[in-house]
Amino acid sequence: MLYTFLRPLVWLVLHTAYALLGGIRYTGRDLVPRTGGVLITPNHISDADPTAIGLALPRPCYFMAKEELFQIPLLGRFIRAMHGFPVKRYSADRSALRMAEQLLKQGEAVVIFPEGKLSEDGQIQELLPGVLLIAQRAGVPIVPAIIEGTDTLMPYGKVLPRPARRRICVRFGTPVTVEDLTGGEKGGDALKQGAERLRARMLALQGRESPEIPAESRPVRTSEERCR
């Protein structure tokens, strides 16, 4: 009930803030399933990323966020009210994994940053195979996503936003299943290889060539779609 009341108000404030700080654009929103469980996996370059991806998604979503944020008075309550739930970083947090799996099985959209932490240099780091395990257990597709420009709005290590030097862009890719990523293979090695292929799809969304993605499956973008 609180989320239903807060979401339109918060989104209005955020849209206004982004417009004043440089603007934000979304592409590929039509690729995100409007119903049913779906796991969204964006890159992570700034603490502003959750708000950017939340604004870009065409449907309400849940977020997995680092546990430390929930320990901050008021902020922690606000994050929970906006459908955030905590995860203990650098560990196999079974509680957080079960929560994500349960939400997906209930038909919700869940956002998990598959790198597990912020990228200091803005490059996509190695992805955690556990992200694929969650989608596999829940039986839902994965939508890779790329966020660009939030690291100028709120650089690594900064806690306050500043005017961005470029328009922020959120780009969604074609949904993919865990079976597609692993080739139908099972086990930890298959999930690790699947995580590498998911990373390759994210790199392709950035316009980087990847041997893991067949040429006919690579996105072809116009200048407008590049969010410039």
Image: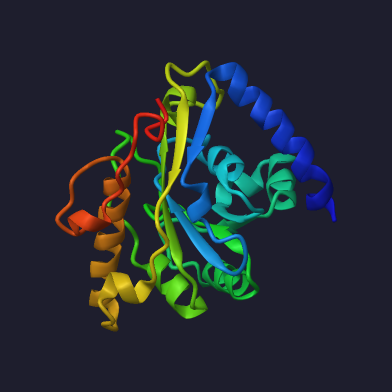
Spot occupied by residue 56 in the image (x, y as percentages of width and height): 56, 42
Residue lying at 62% horizontally and 65% vertically, measured from the top left: 35
Horizontal placement of 70 versus 177: left or right? right
Q: Position of residue 105 (x, y in %)?
A: 60, 76
Q: Residue at x 71, y 49 (%)?
A: 82
Viewer-closest of 114 and 29: 29
Quadrant of the drawing holding the N terminus: bottom right
Whether residue 220 is visible to the viewer of this picture, yes or no, is: yes
Q: Please give the count of numbered marks on the rendered protein.
A: 0
Residue drawn 23% across the image and 75% down it = 189
On screen, 75 above or below 131?
A: above
Above-or-below relation of 179 to 26: below
Q: Position of residue 129 (x, y in %)?
A: 34, 66
Question: Which residue occupies the foreground of this view, 224 or 47?
Answer: 224
Q: How is the image coloured?
A: rainbow
The x and y percentages for residue 210 are: 18, 51
- The quadrant in which residue 226 appears is top left
Q: Quadrant of the C terminus?
A: top left
Quadrant location of residue 118?
top left
Report whether 178 appears left or right of 150.
left
Can the viewer see residue 156 in this picture?
no
Frontmost residue, 164 versus 29? 29
Q: Quadrant of residue 136?
A: bottom left
For the point 66% across and 53% down, the residue is: 60
